[in-house]
Image (cartoon, grey):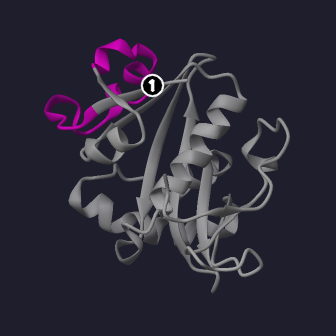
Amino acid sequence: MSALPIFGEQGAGSSSLRRKPSIHIAPEGTAPGSQLLQVRPAALADVPALESLMAPYVATGDLLPRSNYDLCRHIKEYLVAEAGDGDLVGCGSLKIYSRDLAEVAGLAVRAEQQGAGVGRVLMEALVGEARASGIAEVLALTRKPAFFHKLGFELAEKEHFPLKVWADCAKCPRQNCCDEIAVVLKL
């Protein structure tokens, strides 16, 4: 359970990230009227901030690089966590491969916000979108499996996800020396 309560409507049956309503969270004891963080669909105007947010994790190898072109092309897959001052403090995407499989990718939370529940709230929103779309399993490839285990994901073999391997892994620069761990959540 997140230490950050969620305020706002979850929406009724929307299966498109573009129509996903905003989710507002605030620290415990904060009145619902004073939203300090908003989770919303990403917009093209967010691309420079997404690049900046992901850059430290790309540098450490925790995230694969995403070009400006790729971010623009796939912007509808992203959700962002926006602080009250308008700064983006987190992001993540839901890549749908089939009716049965989606992947959480590009999950990043600003270092000073880690441990505050931002990643958990982003994951809950992304998994909620997968559920609303009728997806059977949500996959993540990560170097930090403990975070996903706390959210109910279990270890899996990458080879069990041929659509993912065919779509992305075959083109990955780390293909032959991958150190990411596959985790999956069955919905």
In x, y percent, where is residue 61?
A: 24, 53
Q: Tell me if residue 12 comes above or below residue 48 in the rendering.
A: above
Magenta segment, which residues?
Answer: 157-181
Q: Which residue is mark 1?
A: 167
Taking depth in this image into account, of 30 and 182 the one nearest to the observer is 30
The answer to whether residue 57 is left or right of residue 42 is left
Taking depth in this image into account, of 39 and 49 the one nearest to the observer is 39
Q: Residue furthest bottom?
A: 85
Q: Residue at x 83, y 35 (%)?
A: 13
Q: Residue at x 55, y 54 (%)?
A: 122
Q: Tell me if residue 122 comes above or below residue 133 in the rendering.
A: below
In x, y percent, where is residue 31?
A: 70, 79
Residue 84 drawn in magenta: no
Secondary structure of the residue carrying numbered label 1? helix
Q: Tell me if residue 82 comes above or below residue 67 in the rendering.
A: below
Instruction: Give the position of the C terminus as an image quadrant.
Output: top right
Q: Residue at x 60, y 78 (%)?
A: 29
Q: Residue furthest right?
A: 12
Crowding at dot 1, Cα within 10 Å, few <14 / some 14-19 / many 20+, comes out as few
Majority secondary structure in the magenta region: helix
Name the kind of residue labelled 1 in the image.
Answer: Ala
Residue 159 drawn in magenta: yes
In x, y percent, where is residue 145?
A: 27, 41
